[in-house]
Image (tube, coloured by chain):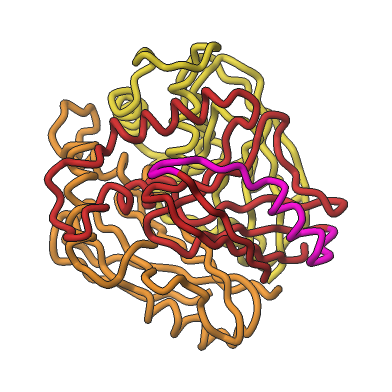
Chain colours: A yellow, B orange, C red
Amino acid sequence: MTEFTVDTTARCQLVKITHDVQSAVTGAGLKDGLCIVFVPHTTAGITINENADPDVVFDIRSAFEKICPWDAGYRHGEGNAAAHVKASMTGSSVSIIVEDGRLRLGTWQGIFFCEFDGPRSRRVWVKTLPA
Amino acid sequence: MTEFTVDTTARCQLVKITHDVQSAVTGAGLKDGLCIVFVPHTTAGITINENADPDVVFDIRSAFEKICPWDAGYRHGEGNAAAHVKASMTGSSVSIIVEDGRLRLGTWQGIFFCEFDGPRSRRVWVKTLPA
Amino acid sequence: MTEFTVDTTARCQLVKITHDVQSAVTGAGLKDGLCIVFVPHTTAGITINENADPDVVFDIRSAFEKICPWDAGYRHGEGNAAAHVKASMTGSSVSIIVEDGRLRLGTWQGIFFCEFDGPRSRRVWVKTLPA
């Protein structure tokens, strides 16, 4: 397993980590198989989406805030319940096929760490499995 | 890795692909392990849900449209930001256990390609991993 | 593949299953690799979230009910369409890294079975894959 860190700078932020994940796969020496990217936090998530136009990421962030607003009369005393809900909406991991040592992603796809309660220093775990 | 195509016929459509995925697993010769079904697009997703009553798929489509409406003042210039948000809500892949060469699904479960910005010709990737 | 059951006691309930999953991994003898936890139902899901403060689980349940209300004019005749939508929002499986025979989870993470149409007796499947 490989770990890398993501230092976020805002409460809600999508940070592109495609290159970090590729580096972890290259470092692990996997040629053919599967790569699991896992976020060991409960107020952050991970997703795959468009890596070209930054407005897409802006719209995703805004839409998630509308769907699950920060202030909505939650019980959880720490005040970050919305971040927990968003973590369960995106999920804690993504799975990506690896062939010829490269992540197989679609033309417009990038991997994004989803910060929902930043800024914080976060960790990401990458595990490789042979086919 | 096996690829097959899905030709969608509406903007928002859930297309059952269970048989295509089973064919890919059979073609790969996997008897025991895991099958990853990955969608290399950023305005489409994938989900597992009821394959019996088509009203379920209708209700999922309608609920997703209410949660994340097509027109809601997004920034992304292409006009399909809602499709990107929905893609992150469903996710880009599903994982299915394979035993005796067969996908292990619950009685009522089917695998659905989720088109959120059709109609288009789409691709689906299937990768198998031995246990 | 290992199966265990979860008997839910309410319509909507998040049940912690971390220990059941660890037992399945230990029983399978996996030391290093990946564990897939799969829910073979279409009105239930699975998620990873905070296992410390039960208010988090309460807030997730409430937020999901606001996002996708039980009564909202659905077509599906069984009356549980909202449960199907929530199943697609959380997803049918989670993937967890295994090292030294232990599930690798973050400090605050637990695995939760998500009942959206209970009470019912439910099944959970666990499959292990070597690295």
Q: Position of residue A32 (x, y in %)?
A: 67, 68
Task: Report the side of B100 relative to C23 (left or right).
Answer: left
Examine the image and state in which quarter residue A98 appears. Answer: bottom right
Examine the image and state in which quarter residue B16 appears. Answer: bottom left
Q: Nearer the viewer, residue A83 or B25?
A: A83
Q: Position of residue A84 (x, y in %)?
A: 50, 27
- Residue in view at x 38 percent, y 79 percent: B20
Task: Report the side of A58 relative to C39 (left or right).
Answer: left
The residues colored magenta run: C10-31
Residue A54 seen in render: no
- Residue in view at x 16 percent, y 39 percent: B70
Q: Nearer the viewer, residue C48 or A23?
A: C48
- Vertical comparison of A70 with B5: above or below: above
Residue A84 seen in render: yes
- Vertical comparison of A69 with C41: above or below: above
Residue C107 falls within the magenta-colored stretch:
no
Quarter in which the C terminus of chain A is drawn: bottom right
- Residue in view at x 63 percent, y 59 percent: C36
Residue C17 falls within the magenta-colored stretch:
yes
Q: Nearer the viewer, residue B16 or B37?
A: B16
- Vertical comparison of B51 with C42: above or below: below
- Residue in view at x 51 percent, y 17 percent: A76
Q: Nearer the viewer, residue C3 or A40?
A: C3
Q: Position of residue B62 (x, y in %)?
A: 17, 48
Task: Report the side of A60 relative to C131 (left or right).
Answer: left
